Amino acid sequence: MRFSVAYPNGKRSAARPFKTSPMYDLFSGMNAVWGRQYGLEVVNYFTLPGKRTCEIPTFKRSNAWDATNAEVAIVRTAVGIGELSNFGKCRVTGPRAREWFDRIMAGTIPQPSRLALSPMLARLGRITGDFTVSCLSGTEFMLTASYGAQGWHLRRFDAHWDDGVRVENVSDARSGFQIAGPTPQSCWNEPLAATWRRSA
């Protein structure tokens, strides 16, 4: 291992899978090719039928090309669904939450039922995090950022601790999906649409 060649996109298989999302078994059955991020198994791409479910290391164009090309074409012309397990997520609550955000974030903090992008800066002005800030109420917020940087972000939060704010790392407790493409309605069936109407 010490003197082995490191190929682009090369993955080590030791001690894997270490941590998985609830979609792991389903995605494995859909020919997922797995990578890992901060210990979590994440889908790199879904291989084409009949192909190997691994990316072959090379310094040239790999066997992932045709499969990822097909995925991009589908999202550009129809619809695709992506899992959000590989995003870091923090729940921030407390009566001083908005004041705390105004102190550690460089962007405008959104009002309830709104979201905004905001960087977090270090003392010298360098970017230490890039977040989606969702305001759920006057005292509750959700932060979404890099899964792999959650330890770094939490240390930064601890350095700016405030007794009127509670920060809870919910990266592995909460997940979700994103829908992308010009025809998102094509993935909604009537029972699901009815459920959404009832909950609206």
Image: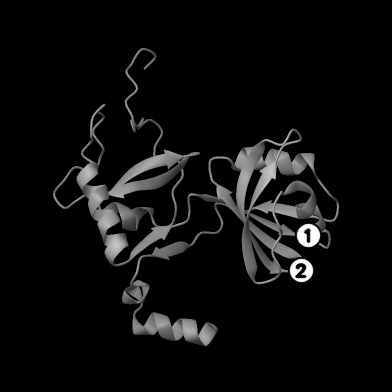
Question: CA separation, marks 1 and 2?
Answer: 8 Å
Q: Quadrant of residue 2?
A: top left
Please provide percent x and percent y for residue 21.
Answer: 44, 53
Examine the rendering and report whether any part of residue 115 can be seen: yes
**Residue 111: % across, % down:** 71, 68
Mark 1–mark 2 CB contact (< 8 Å): yes
Residue at image coords 40%, 46%: 42
Q: Amino acid at mark 1?
A: Arg
Foreground pick, 171 / 111: 111
Q: Which is nearer the N-term, disc 1 or disc 2?
A: 1
> Given the current orientation, which residue lies at the most extreme left position?
50
Q: Could you tell me which residue is drawn at 60 percent across and 47 percent down?
A: 130
Residue 136 in the image: above or below residue 149? below
Q: Quadrant of the N terminus?
A: top left
Question: In this rendering, is residue 121 above or below 171?
Answer: above
Quarter where residue 194 is shown: bottom left
Above-or-below relation of 14 to 119: above
**Label 2 is placed on what type of residue?**
Gly
**Element carrying mark 2:** loop
Residue marked by disc 1: 98
- The residue where tag 2 is placed is 138
Quadrant of the rendering where the C terminus is positioned: bottom right
Q: Position of residue 152 (x, y in %)?
A: 64, 37
